Image (cartoon, rainbow, N blue to C red):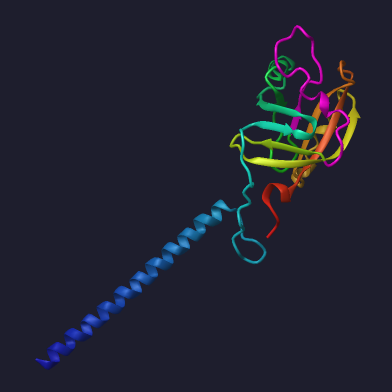
Amino acid sequence: MKKTKQVRLITLGILFLLAIGGTVIFVLWRGSTEVLQVSNVNLSLNVNGQLPTPRIPLGTGEPNHISIQDREIEAPVIYVDEVSEPVFQEALSRGVVHYPETPNPGEPGNPYIFGHSSDYFWKPGDYKKVFAPLVDIPLETEVRITNDKGELFIYKVIETKVVGPKDTSVLDQYNNERTMLTLQTSYPIGTALKRYIAVTELDEEATYGPAE
């Protein structure tokens, strides 16, 4: 009888240990799977072999909107799919226009946004002079723009210039190594002879907060 009880106790002990071991293995397996899933979302490990911390903009706002408070500019950003003058003109009656095939705000590269500085008085629309105050905008002026999710990205003007109407260098994407935003309006005001350009770059700290 004693031997039978001993055998039973040993058997129960082995089963108990196996159960604990199986739980630990299951937890580790689940943890490993979750890490892989997170890794897929957050792209690759950083130089220290750790998962990078997602950088989420500090603020949100009305989706697809641009604001330059120092110049009293407020307008919706209209997205179009076609490079066409009739399409552009219709969209310009509803706000400022995102040039097709350039990145969205906040993305690497150079989103390109253009708007009227003047327009014919008989044409419809509430944004005929929306970008007129862009002319002679000071360097370091803050430009606030949201994407389609309402995430807020804050840029600062780093360069202004006047170019010809066929100068495509303003669409330069900087090899997607910088996070830029270019704004354009017609110049001199009342004509379409040239283009006034304000080049801006993302203010990382204002958008995301201090780097960790």
Residue 191 placed where, x, y %? 87, 16
The residue furthest top is 122
Splitting the image into 4 quarters, where does residue 140 fall? top right
Splitting the image into 4 quarters, where does residue 169 fall? top right
Residue 180 visible, this orientation: yes
Splitting the image into 4 quarters, where does residue 111 fall? top right
Above or below: residue 200 compared with residue 120 = below
The residue furthest bottom is 2
Above or below: residue 44 compared with residue 193 = below
Q: Overall secondary structure of the magenta stretch?
A: loop
Q: In terms of depth relative to the viewer, which is nearer, 125 or 182?
A: 125
- In the displayed structure, does residue 30 sit left or right of residue 8? right
- In the displayed structure, does residue 82 sit left or right of residue 175? left
Residue 89 placed where, x, y %? 73, 16
Q: Residue at x 47, y 63 (%)?
A: 32
Residue 178 placed where, x, y %? 77, 46
Q: In terms of depth relative to the viewer, which is nearer, 88 or 130?
A: 130
What range is drawn magenta here?
112-140
Residue 190 placed where, x, y %? 86, 15
